[in-house]
Amino acid sequence: MARVIRFRNQLTAMYLFKKIADLRHHLERINRAGKTIGFVPTMGALHEGHASLVRQSAEETSCTVCSIFVNPTQFNEATDLVKYPKTPEKDIALLLDAGCSVLFIPDVAEVYPDGQRSALHLDFGYLDQPMEGAYRPGHFVGVAQVVKRLLDIVQPDQLFMGQKDFQQFAIVQHMVTKLALSVNLRMCPTVRETDGLAMSSRNMRLTPAQRALAPLIYQTLSQAKANMHDQWPDALKSAAMKALSVPGMEPEYFEIVDSRTLQPITIFEDHDMVVACTAVRVGEVRLIDNLILKTM
Ligand code: PAF
């Protein structure tokens, strides 16, 4: 059954559901009242980046649903799944503060009653091949599987996702279009620490020395943007890979791609929107980030 969590001042309330049937019962009442539903899927360990998605949803829809579900099918490294941080009390406080109306925390059997093998067979073309797709085989099949399942459960009008996972956004956008899902997908800007490091649940796994090194990722992306009018994309990429190859840090890729196709570009002028995407290993922690270099 539902559990209602309330702020001490009794002004803000958020419903917590663990079972789909209870959640659906509640959301059907919201639908019948003609209210709009915004949805923010997460894996917990929430930070200001997630809060910004919730705030945007709360501003633009009448009922914001947030899910916390550490999806086992999108982890290609078992240790990553085991080590995925869990901060439930902090998450609840952050969600209440950001204006979330409904929190959905299902267990694995609730999300995957028929087992974890994906029944969703979508062809992503090139979108799931490069970058994260190359380094994390099967990752996007798991992401698409869980997002589709959660969309079927929540049935939101609007889906809010972060720019930080740029390739994930492209995959979900492709799925929404291909399956003609009746949801409006919204991209929200990356939220950064004051030194530029993109907020991520993984940042809390960095040692103080690694944390001090990590802003180099954003600095390198910014440097590529500063130099884009004087250098070819290939030269920017080589310079970035070199800049990120410092002791304690190992870049996996730095790609300058068309934002729609994710194909590497050779000439900026041929593309309306271009984004630089990178993944870097800082010790055991793998961080990703991106920066839009060019928009229409
Ligand atoms: O970005 C994430 O946290 C996850 O990939 C998502 C979209 C919640 C699916 O598990």
Image (cartoon, rainbow, N blue to C red):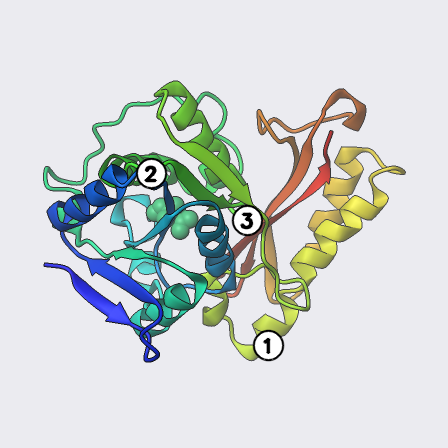
Residue beneath the point at 87% across and 37% down = 229
Q: Secondary structure at mark 3?
A: loop
Residue beneath the point at 68% across and 56% down = 218
The disc labelled 3 sits on which kind of residue?
A: Lys
The disc labelled 2 sits on which kind of residue?
A: Pro
**Residue occupied by mark 1:** 209
**Camera-side residue of 285 and 37:** 37
Query: Mark 2 vs mark 1: which is more N-terminal?
Result: 2
Mark 2 C-beta to ligand 1 under 8 Å: no
**Residue occupied by mark 3:** 164
Residue 209 image-quadrant placement: bottom right
Gap in angstroms between the C-alphas marked 2 and 3: 22 Å
Q: Is residue 257 left or right of residue 225?
A: left
The image shows residue 106 at horizontal and vertical percentages of 19, 53
In the rendered view of the protein, which quadrant contains the N terminus?
A: bottom left
**Camera-side residue of 13 and 113:** 13
**Residue occupied by mark 2:** 156
93, above or below 199, in the image: below
